[in-house]
Image (cartoon, rainbow, N blue to C red):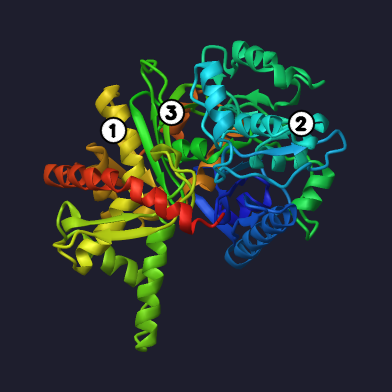
Amino acid sequence: MTEKELIESGQAVLGIEFGSTRIKAVLIDKAHNPIASGAHDWQNQLVDGIWSYSEEAIWGGLQDCYAKLLVDVKEKYGVVIKKLAAIGFSGMMHGYLAFDKDKKLLVPFRTWRNTITGEAADKLTEVLNFNIPQRWSIAHLYQAILNDESHVKDIDYFTTLAGYIHWTLTGEKVLGIGEASGMFPIDSTKRDYDADMIAKFDALPEVAKYSWKLAEILPKVLMAGEKAGTLTEEGAKLLDVSGNLEAGIPLAPPEGDAGTGMTATNSVSLRTGNVSAGTSVFAMVVLEKELSKVYKELDLVTTPVGDAVAMVHCNNCTSDLNAWIGLFKEFSDMFGMNIDINDIYGKLYNNAMTGDEDCGGLVAFNLFSGEPVIGLDDGAPMFARKADAKMNLANFMRTHLYASLATLKIGCDILFKEEHVKVDTLYGHGGLFKTKGVGQSVLAAAMNAPVAVMETAGEGGPWGMAILASYVVNNTDNEAFDEFLKNKVFKGAKGTTLEPKQEDVAGFDAYIETYKAAIEAEGKLAQVLSVKA
């Protein structure tokens, strides 16, 4: 069957992911190969000191993304999409979208990027004896309660961005278990929210005064492969403004970018892990056993089928790095060089690997926002150097590459060095790995572990979400999800694996000691220069 025939017969599968800076759609065939795509760029806005995306931006962005997919399909195959085998939506995990009984959004969307829930996160971590990060949905809810915000009494439902999109298009208040694990702790033995912890939350005096119970306002938890409703008539019109898309298409449980990242890198089995490095960065390792204690630097979430995963999440990764590249682009344009931005990335990144392994006495902080892993509520990018530093272009760029993974390394050092968690291979995906070998080498040095990058890694989250949607309708052999990935998606997949160079590992370790010593200075600078100031 040709791609044209596949699309015309309604057998293609669609995945759409709402990333921090881009909404992307990927259409796949029955062999899970991408056959068309569309994208919409967007940015969060600071609204009254809170990072947010408006409802208009959410729906306008989705419609534009889907419209661009239709253009790609029309140009490549000369057809119009009317039916699909399945659809799946994913997005930035965590955050807070609260609605009343009339489906009215009670306060502007509070994204994962906000570091405004410190009091709630600390108290819940103590009460539940489970690390609750600031960005988790339950921390946002509890902070609103502690702040005595007037909207809390009217809450009928709260969810994540992916959950909101799915609910609006299907009417179903559900989440995939991986996404749900970023709202509230999951009991991996029961594949549902931890009932004892829900009871402890409901029993808190400041919570008990409200008429709702937590279980009543949380989305229902679903496993990968379960049907999560169908596209309604209203939903079809909302997604496809051209009016060609038909209702009745089955949808997969909405997932988070962590779950789609695990899927897209085939890292859902024990002793596998992945690192997603873009605007934010996170590492995820599927655990063989429980951790010995609670760590504030380590989150416990799940795979799309509910297995426990240790996660180190950092709010900042490539934004500052990209800003510096933009400066070099501006410089080259000023001299009329007209160098393609991708060439600038490639030359500077590769040259960075000729620098000193410890960056020669340079240090940088890439913090556009707060970074809980190192205890900072606010951020401001900072570059500094020792008076006798080896200040050259290679060391400068290597410093910023290291800075993009520095907080991730600090968190993962706990996982690997203190808890002695074993991982056979880490799979890298995201913008940091676009220049072949560079981001991969830096990550291998940071983690002291082999790092693989698959040829499909550039497809990322939306491709992973399309695979999850395919699993709902194309798992004809009734395989477990990891077997489905191994046999139906990644069989014969090509990629490269780099082993860590011990001189690079030692250099990054030395750099991190300088970095840690400078955290206090970064904190003081952030207080003065923070966007919130």
Residue 27 bears which disc, if any?
Answer: none
> From the viewer's perspective, is 101 left or right of 224?
right
Question: In the image, residue 24 lies at what x, y percent?
Answer: 57, 54
Q: CA distance from mark 2 to mark 3?
A: 28 Å
What secondary structure is marked by label 1? Answer: helix
The residue pinned by badge 3 equals 296
Q: Amino acid at mark 2?
A: Tyr
Q: Amino acid at mark 1?
A: Asp
What's the residue at 42%, 65% (across, down)?
323
Q: Residues within 10 Å of mark 3 (few under 14, many from 20)?
A: some
Q: Between tags 3 and 1, which lies in front?
A: 3
> From the viewer's perspective, is 509 left or right of 262?
left
Tell me which label, 2 or 3, sits earlier in the chain.
2
Question: In the image, residue 23 lies at what x, y percent?
Answer: 59, 54
What secondary structure is marked by label 3? Answer: loop
Residue 157 bears which disc, if any?
Answer: 2
Q: CA distance from mark 2 to mark 1?
A: 38 Å
